[in-house]
């Protein structure tokens, strides 16, 4: 597979707009994931282990906000023994076009389907599992609780929801320290101070993170009883929520 184009979106003098998942972002999205999200691949592998233990043959796994399909392709590889169906849903046509091309490249087009839909209107009853990888943080805060309740209602009894998110700490000093540690990580992966600052500016009104406590409380209100964090790295966390059987 050819290397993904490098993310140089913010090597510019000004930012014309808030962050948008347009064609320019699509071209560098995979590189952006690798360089911007701590332990991205390890979280995918850990998530696959949870899915392997809870999903049953014949289940469908939905990736909401699937973008270019990178995560779903990896899940289909790690879970190829489970006889699952895989569905990616996104509201960006450019993202889905690239996802379909990648599925064809890896000869996965018969196992993975991609749909252009608004994920907040998710309507696929009997879902075995749902993935929200760094997606909930882009949903308007006032819509999140209803969105999670909708996912809960569409899961089969015993179904699983996995969420990975950027999170905040309610301790101001720790929150600042976590952000600084994260920025040092990004610098170690080739981003400049200017790029980091400009991307943060572009995301300021678009990506609104909650704390671990706020996320787990929302999942509880949606109806999930078993809710845990299964990964945490400073200001990033992953949550597992299981619907009662």
Image (cartoon, rainbow, N blue to C red):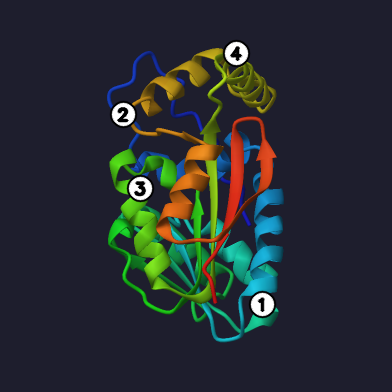
Which callout, 1 or 4, points to the residue nearer the camera? 4
**Residue 5 visible in the snapshot:** no
Residue at 45% over, 34% down: 209
- Residue 40 as seen in the image, left or right of residue 72: right
Splitting the image into 4 quarters, where does residue 208 fall? top left
Q: Earlier in the sequence, mark 3 or mark 2?
A: 2
Asked if the residue at tag 3 contacts the one at tag 1, i.e. Cβ–Cβ closer than 8 Å, the answer is: no
Q: Which of these two is toward me, 113 or 141?
A: 141
Dot 1 corresponds to which residue? 80
- Residue 75 as seen in the image, left or right of residue 167: right
Q: Earlier in the sequence, mark 2 or mark 4?
A: 2
Give the image location of residue 5, x and y in percent.
53, 41
- Residue 237 as seen in the image, left or right of residue 145: right
Dot 4 corresponds to which residue? 173
Q: Earlier in the sequence, mark 2 or mark 1?
A: 2
Splitting the image into 4 quarters, where does residue 192 fall? top right
The quadrant of the image that shows the N terminus is bottom right
Give the image location of residue 241, x and y in percent.
55, 59
Dot 2 corresponds to which residue? 18
Residue at 60% over, 47% down: 238
The quadrant of the image that shows the C terminus is bottom right
Which callout, 3 or 2, points to the residue nearer the camera? 3
**CA–CA distance in space, label 2 to label 4:** 27 Å
**CA–CA distance in space, label 1 to label 4:** 44 Å
Dot 3 lies on which element? helix
Dot 3 corresponds to which residue? 144
Q: Which of these two is toward me, 100 or 33?
A: 33
Residue at 57% over, 75% down: 107
Q: Which of these two is toward me, 149 or 209?
A: 149
**CA–CA distance in space, label 3 to label 4:** 27 Å
Badge 1 density bin: few <14, some 14–19, many ≥20, Cα 10 Å? few
């Amino acid at each position: 597979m050819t290397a993904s184009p490098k993310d140089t979106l913010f090597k510019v003098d000004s930012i014309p707009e808030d962050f948008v998942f347009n064609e320019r972002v699509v071209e560098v999205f995979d590189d952006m994931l690798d360089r911007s999200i701590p332990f991205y691949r390890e979280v995918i592998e850990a998530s696959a282990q949870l899915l392997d233990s809870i999903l049953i043959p014949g289940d469908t796994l939905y990736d909401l906000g699937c973008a270019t399909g990178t995560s779903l392709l990896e899940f289909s590889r790690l879970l190829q023994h489970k006889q699952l169906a895989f569905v990616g849903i996104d509201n960006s046509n450019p993202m889905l076009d690239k996802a379909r091309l990648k599925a064809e490249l890896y000869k996965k087009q018969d196992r993975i389907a991609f749909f252009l839909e608004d994920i907040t209107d998710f309507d696929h009853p009997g879902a075995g599992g749902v993935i929200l990888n760094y997606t909930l943080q882009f949903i308007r805060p006032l819509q999140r609780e209803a969105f999670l309740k909708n996912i809960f209602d569409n899961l089969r009894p015993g179904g699983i929801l996995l969420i990975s998110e950027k999170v905040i700490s309610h301790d101001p000093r720790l929150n600042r320290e976590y952000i600084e540690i994260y920025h040092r990580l990004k610098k170690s992966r080739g981003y400049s101070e200017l790029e980091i600052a400009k991307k943060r500016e572009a995301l300021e009104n678009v990506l609104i993170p909650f704390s671990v406590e706020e996320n787990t409380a929302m999942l509880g209100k949606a109806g999930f009883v078993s809710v845990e964090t299964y990964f945490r790295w400073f200001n990033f966390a992953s949550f597992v929520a299981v619907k009662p059987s």
